[in-house]
Each structure stands twice: as C-alpha cells, then as structure tokens.
C-alpha cells in the first residue's frame, strides 16, 4: 500500500506515520506539509509545500496512492468561526478535492473529533465546522471515505503535541491513563491505535463511514 499523509508533524500524524513505517504492508509514505516530517526512513519521502490548501504545483507527485490519511488540524481556542473554518473546512476540502480528481480510487481518512455535529446547526462552533467538513468529504467521489472521531488520545512512543499546554496536560494525565482506559474504554485511545485503525480501514473498509473511539479501538 502507498500512503499519502497530511499533518505528519502533529501529535496524531506522528503516531500515524510511525505505524505506517512499522507496517510491512506499506511500501511508501509521502508526507505533505509545511515542514519535513523528520525521521529518515527508506519508506518515507517529504513533500514540503508552502500552503497545503494549494497543491497545484505538485499535482504530478500526488498520484498512485491507495490511501490518504488527513491528520492536519488546529484547536478552535481563540479563533473566530470564520478563521477556524478557513483552517479546517477550506484547507481540508481544497486538498481533498484535488486528490479526488487525481486519485478517485483512493481511500480518504479524516481525523475529526468526538462530538462533531453532523447537522451543522448546533451551538458549538468547532463541532458545526467539523460536521460541515465531514459531510463535504463524504460527498466527494473517493473509493471510500472515513471520518475518525476520537475522544482523548494518549500519545505513545515519545510523541508530543506541538502545543505547549497540551504537552503539560498529557504529561500530567499519563500516569492515570491505565485507569482511564479501564473506566472509560469508549472514550480513550492512543496514537498507536489510531494509526493502526487507519491502516485497517484502508485495507478492509468498515461498515459505516463515521468511526467513534470504540470503533477505532476495535480495529
């Protein structure tokens, strides 16, 4: 399998990249982003672009992939709905529409979040925007598209969030994670499980397009 990965430098993307590199069934990974993904590996190639929403100059390098794992995302904290929508809906759909035109046979997997509002009319801003993004992605002519809605994600393998206060929070919660996993199995997952679940749906599909934390963990 050949994998296209957006957001490989973020916390979730780092975990997905690591699982792709570990998986013997993955032949190559092309990491697309504003910065290089980092680790040198024979399977990995970086495609650094100034703006992931504008892939026009690199379209020739984006064909021949079986799956796209889209892990780019920003927190809505401190952002207006217009700004958050530009960084979430506009950017994601711009890239996805290009890929659907170039590689309609691929499977597209998008990292959303628990509580996403599919009606697009709820009171919570980020949930409305994520819901609109999911709905638009599911309407594109990919072979298949899956929306991952994890709740709490515990970073493993030394992976850290690029957001400082997230790093502090994860460090504080880490000793309690085993207890959380026992008490709330449907609300917690790990970067490892998210990465492996993405590979699983790319290979075998799933019986519905929206996956909550329990679905991710079961895969």
Image (cartoon, helix red, strand yellow):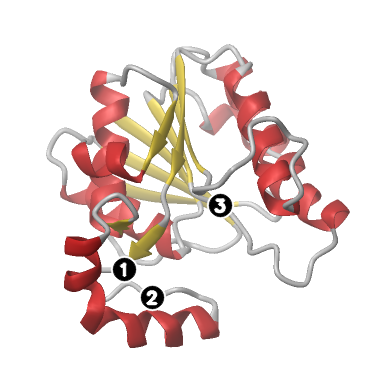
Q: Position of residue 176 (x, y in %)?
A: 24, 79
Distance CA(mark 3)–CA(mark 2): 15 Å
Question: 2 left or right of 82?
Answer: left
C-beta proximity under 8 Å, tags 1 and 2:
yes
In the image, what residue occupies the spot 61% across and 32% down?
A: 134
Dot 3 and dot 1 residues touching (CB under 8 Å): no
Q: Position of residue 207 (x, y in %)?
A: 33, 17
Q: Nearer the viewer, residue 161 or 152?
A: 152
Q: Which mark is residue 160?
A: 2
Q: In the image, 193: left or right of 142? A: left
Point 53% across, 45% down: residue:
112
Q: How far apart in space, not on screen, are marks 1 and 2 (Cα)?
A: 7 Å
| Label 2: how many Cα within 10 Å (few below 14, some 14–19, many 20+) | many
Q: Which residue is mark 1?
A: 155
| Residue for point 31% across, 21% down | 206
The relative height of residue 29 versus residue 204 in the rendered view (above or below) is below
Q: Residue tagged by mark 3?
A: 72
Judged from this view, the residue extending furthest toward the left is: 24
- Residue 73 shows which numbered tag? none
Please tell me which residue lies in front, 5 or 140: 140
- Mark 3 lies on a secondary structure that is loop
Q: Earlier in the sequence, mark 1 or mark 2?
A: 1
Residue 157, by quadrant, is bottom left
Question: Which secondary structure lies at badge 1?
Answer: loop
């Amino acid at each position: 399998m050949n994998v296209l990965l957006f957001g490989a430098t973020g916390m979730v993307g780092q975990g997905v990249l690591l699982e792709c590199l570990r998986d013997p069934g993955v032949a190559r990974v092309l990491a697309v982003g504003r910065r290089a993904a980092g680790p040198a590996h024979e399977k990995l190639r970086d495609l650094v672009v100034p703006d992931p929403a504008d892939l026009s100059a690199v379209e020739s390098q984006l064909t021949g992939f079986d799956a796209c794992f889209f892990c780019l995302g920003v927190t809505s904290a401190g952002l207006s709905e217009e700004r958050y929508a530009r960084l979430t809906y506009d950017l994601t759909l711009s890239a996805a529409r290009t890929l659907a035109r170039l590689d309609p046979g691929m499977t597209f997997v998008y990292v959303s979040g628990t509580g996403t509002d599919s009606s697009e009319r709820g009171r919570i801003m980020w949930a409305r925007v994520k819901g609109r993004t999911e709905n638009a992605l599911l309407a594109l002519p990919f072979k298949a598209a899956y929306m991952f809605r994890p709740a709490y994600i515990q970073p493993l393998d030394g992976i850290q969030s690029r957001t400082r206060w997230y790093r502090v929070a994860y460090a504080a919660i880490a000793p309690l994670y085993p207890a959380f996993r026992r008490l709330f199995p449907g609300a917690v997952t790990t970067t490892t499980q998210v990465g492996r679940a993405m590979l699983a749906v790319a290979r075998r599909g799933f019986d519905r397009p929206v996956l909550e934390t329990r679905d991710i963990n079961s895969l």
